[in-house]
């Protein structure tokens, strides 16, 4: 999908531009005041402007739906999305803004699926999902199966951050075998989340398991870290795989 040309000298500006080749960021928390992301519309606009400056043309922001902490609904998210879109237009930022959700696979989401309630999708039938980072979920595969039976394509958010899978890497293969897509947090490639996450990210890259990449943007520290030279080099390798679908969203 992407072609690279060798060059004799480092070019920091060219490396920085590599992130823009993704075109679409499909994982972030930029709708203000509804989860642990942007607290207000001013922050939302500054973070969106920062992504635009990096070369993104489209943002599909994904607020948490995690019933014990963030009781967001489809209706709340879409209503707040229009607020953000209006602010982006008034700020004259030339970037598309859409919204899906990051669904935590708990009893609430299981009930949504069982009741055939419409889920917010990243694109087409793709639904971003996450599960506990502290311990394995015994009901995970059942919920994923039920989602697939409803016609959804599960996308596992930041699989490299489930560090208890260091001792059970075969589970990643099981998730791929049942048809799940994997989404990389870009900053996992820089060591931002720690050594174990970084090592798992590189393991999954070597397995060619990643299908999508997202910033998981919450705040200004994330935006600053996206300018890391270490990210440019690793992202180039990822894009060379030809598997990353962001530009197709």
Image (cartoon, grey):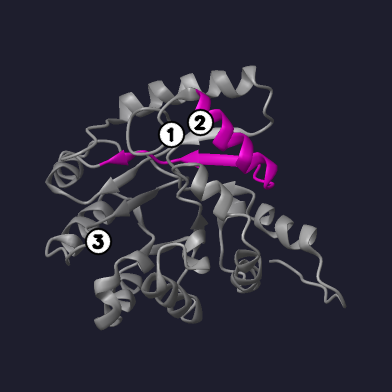
Callout 1 secondary element: loop
- Bounds of the magenta segment: 42-65
Give the labeled residue for mark 3: 133
Count of marks, rendered view: 3
Q: Position of residue 149 (x, y in %)?
A: 25, 54
The Cα–Cα distance between marks 3 and 1, rounded to whole angstroms, is 22 Å
Give the labeled residue for mark 1: 38
Q: Residue at x 56, y 63 (%)?
A: 244
Q: In terms of sequence position, does the residue under pointer 1 or pointer 2 come before the other?
A: 1
Is residue 180 visible in the rendered image? The answer is no
Is residue 226 visible in the rendered image? The answer is yes
Q: Which mark is residue 44?
A: 2
Q: Which mark is residue 230?
A: none
Q: Residue at x 63, y 21 (%)?
A: 89
The reply to whether callout 1 and callout 2 are in contact (CB within 8 Å) is: yes
Left or right, 141 with respect to 96, comes to: left
Q: Residue at x 23, y 42 (%)?
A: 66
Q: In terms of sequence position, does the residue under pointer 3 or pointer 2 come before the other?
A: 2
Q: Residue at x 29, y 79 (%)?
A: 166
């Amino acid at each position: 999908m992407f072609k690279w040309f060798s060059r004799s000298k480092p070019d920091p500006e060219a490396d920085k531009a590599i992130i823009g080749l993704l075109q679409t960021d499909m994982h972030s928390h930029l709708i203000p005041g509804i989860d642990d992301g942007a607290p207000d519309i001013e922050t939302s606009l500054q973070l969106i402007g920062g992504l635009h400056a990096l070369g993104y043309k489209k943002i599909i922001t994904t607020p948490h739906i995690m019933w014990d902490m963030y009781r967001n609904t489809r209706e709340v998210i879409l209503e707040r999305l229009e607020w953000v879109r209006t602010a982006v237009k008034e700020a004259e930022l030339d970037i598309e803004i859409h919204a899906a959700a990051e669904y935590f696979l708990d009893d609430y989401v299981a009930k949504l699926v069982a009741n055939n309630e419409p889920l917010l999708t990243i694109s087409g039938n793709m639904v971003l999902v996450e599960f506990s980072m502290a311990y394995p979920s015994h009901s995970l595969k059942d919920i994923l199966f039920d989602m697939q039976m409803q016609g959804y394509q599960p996308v596992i958010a930041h699989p490299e951050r489930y560090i208890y899978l260091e001792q059970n890497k075969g589970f990643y293969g099981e998730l791929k075998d049942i048809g799940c897509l994997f989404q990389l947090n870009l900053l996992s490639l820089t060591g931002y989340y720690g050594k174990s996450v970084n090592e798992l990210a590189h393991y999954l890259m070597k397995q060619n398991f990643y299908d999508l990449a997202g910033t998981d943007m919450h705040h200004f520290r994330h935006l600053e870290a996206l300018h890391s030279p270490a990210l440019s080099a690793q992202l180039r390798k990822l894009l060379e795989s030809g598997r990353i679908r962001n530009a197709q969203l």
